Amino acid sequence: MVSAAIFDMDGLLFDTERLCAEAWRSVAAERGMRIPEELFLSCVGRNARDMRAIVSRACGDDFPFDDFTDRTRAWMSDRMLASGPPEKPGIRVLFDYFSAKNVPIALATSTREQTARTMIEQARLTHYFSAFAFGNQVEHGKPFPDIFLLAM
């Protein structure tokens, strides 16, 4: 018997990894830069603090991290405003199943709270969740378990 279900937003609810990769490539190209795919992949699932450290180690402390991430968020936001978050197939069926069984559903995501809430609201999924945990609420991001423990 399942007593609670905890979902990570990126990759399980939404196909944001693909969208984010497109944003990184596009914003980098606008700036005349090339971001190695390996660098992007090493940042997947990480909170902003951890991403900053990873990118600084790879690109140097003079990399315009804040500007780059602001522009990639804006790029992604524009796409999602136009077509909604890229929902993974079957997520509503799964949520309906858990809801019918009275299993609480929590969201644990390394995404910033404002961004995550906007995506959940755009997709009209808010009513499914009984708890939320966001990347900016924990000291240690993934792969540490902090975000999942907070969601519980």
Image (spheres, rainbow, N blue to C red):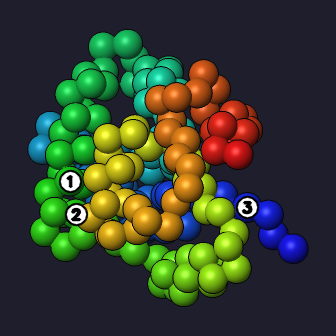
137 lies above or below 60:
below
Labelled pair 3, 1 in contact (Cβ < 8 Å): no
The image shows residue 113 at horizontal and vertical percentages of: 39, 39
Marks 3 and 2, how far apart at CA: 29 Å
Q: Residue at x 38, y 13 (%)?
A: 61
Q: Quadrant of the N terminus?
A: bottom right
The image shows residue 16 at horizontal and vertical percentages of: 40, 61
Marks 3 and 1, how far apart at CA: 30 Å
Q: Secondary structure at mark 1?
A: helix
Answer few, some or many: residues within 10 Å of disc 2's Cα (few below 14, many 20 plus, some between 14 and 19). some
Q: Nearer the viewer, residue 50 or 88?
A: 88
Labelled pair 1, 2 in contact (Cβ < 8 Å): yes
145 lies above or below 93:
above
Which quarter of the figure has residue 138? top right
Q: What's the residue type where badge 3 is placed?
A: Ala
Marks 1 and 2, how far apart at CA: 5 Å
Q: Secondary structure at mark 2?
A: helix
- Residue 77 badge: 1
118 lies above or below 39:
below
Q: Is residue 116 left or right of residue 26?
A: right
